[in-house]
């Protein structure tokens, strides 16, 4: 059982809030089921468990509580953000040096840590409360998915919700749009 136990330990390292929500017994049972369905294919154990959010969303009884899948998605994404490659941000002076006539065709490259999520549940509030050792709010489903932006600066992860306009502009940029496309998305 050492192989299975080590993979469950790896899941616990990546998904501590999910573990807290489920409790020890249910998390270990989930771990056994997941390891049986998804043996490790990675050379590094750090990358084990990327499919857990999808697994929770498709497997009973976990699929009956969609927030479980979203918590796993958030925790995996935060781990990806933290582990992403470093990059030097463009300095303000470099942007100021760009000719104003060239801005409309300017395309942006984003820091490797940048991630974009849409969450239907109050997943972040639940995650934050449990991370602080507080009693989490009851799960609540929003009328519409809330767009979230996640990134790392130095060795600290950050995240925040976005307005619909911000999300549209970011999505345009992430899909290769130029600065003119971003401005149109904000109109």
Image (cartoon, rainbow, N blue to C red):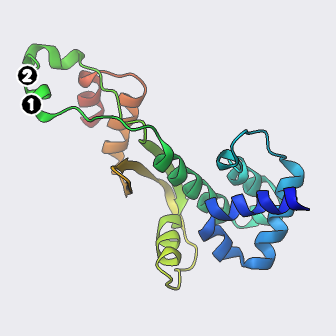
Point out which mark residue 93 bears.
Answer: 1
Q: Would residue 46 appear left or right of 24 to someone viewing this image?
A: left
According to the picture, the residue beneath numbered tag 2 turns out to be 97
Where does the C terminus fall, quadrant-wise?
top left
21 to 46, vertically: above or below: below
Q: Would residue 187 appear left or right of 79 to someone viewing this image?
A: left
135 to 163, vertically: above or below: below
Residue at 38% across, 49% down: 152
Residue 75 lies in quadrant? bottom right
Residue 43 lies in quadrant? top right
Residue at 84% across, 46% down: 39
Q: CA distance from mark 1 to mark 2?
A: 6 Å
Disc 1 + disc 2, Cβ < 8 Å: yes
Pick whichever, 51 or 145, lies toward us: 51
Q: Residues within 10 Å of mark 2 (few under 14, many from 20)?
A: few
The secondary structure type at the circle numbered 1 is helix
115 to 91, vertically: above or below: below
Where does the N terminus fall, quadrant-wise?
bottom right
Q: Residues within 10 Å of mark 1 (few under 14, many from 20)?
A: few
Pick whichever, 10 or 70, lies toward us: 10
Pick whichever, 21 or 43, lies toward us: 43
């Amino acid at each position: 059982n050492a192989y299975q136990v080590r993979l469950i330990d790896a899941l616990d390292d990546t998904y501590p809030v999910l573990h807290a929500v489920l409790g020890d017994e249910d998390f270990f049972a989930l771990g056994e089921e997941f390891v049986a369905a998804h043996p490790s294919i990675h050379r590094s154990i750090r990358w084990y468990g990327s499919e857990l959010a999808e697994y929770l969303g498709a497997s009973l009884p976990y699929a009956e509580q969609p927030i479980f899948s979203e918590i796993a998605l958030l925790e995996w994404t935060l781990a990806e953000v933290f582990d992403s490659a470093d990059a030097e941000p463009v300095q303000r002076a470099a942007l100021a040096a760009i000719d104003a006539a060239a801005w409309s065709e300017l395309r942006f490259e984003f820091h490797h840590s940048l991630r974009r999520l849409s969450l239907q549940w109050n997943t972040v509030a639940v995650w934050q409360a449990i991370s602080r050792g507080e009693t989490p709010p009851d799960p609540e489903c929003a009328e519409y998915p809330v767009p979230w932006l996640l990134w790392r600066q130095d060795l600290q992860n950050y995240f925040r919700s976005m307005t619909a306009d911000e999300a549209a502009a970011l999505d345009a940029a992430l899909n290769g749009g130029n600065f003119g496309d971003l401005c149109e998305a904000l109109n």
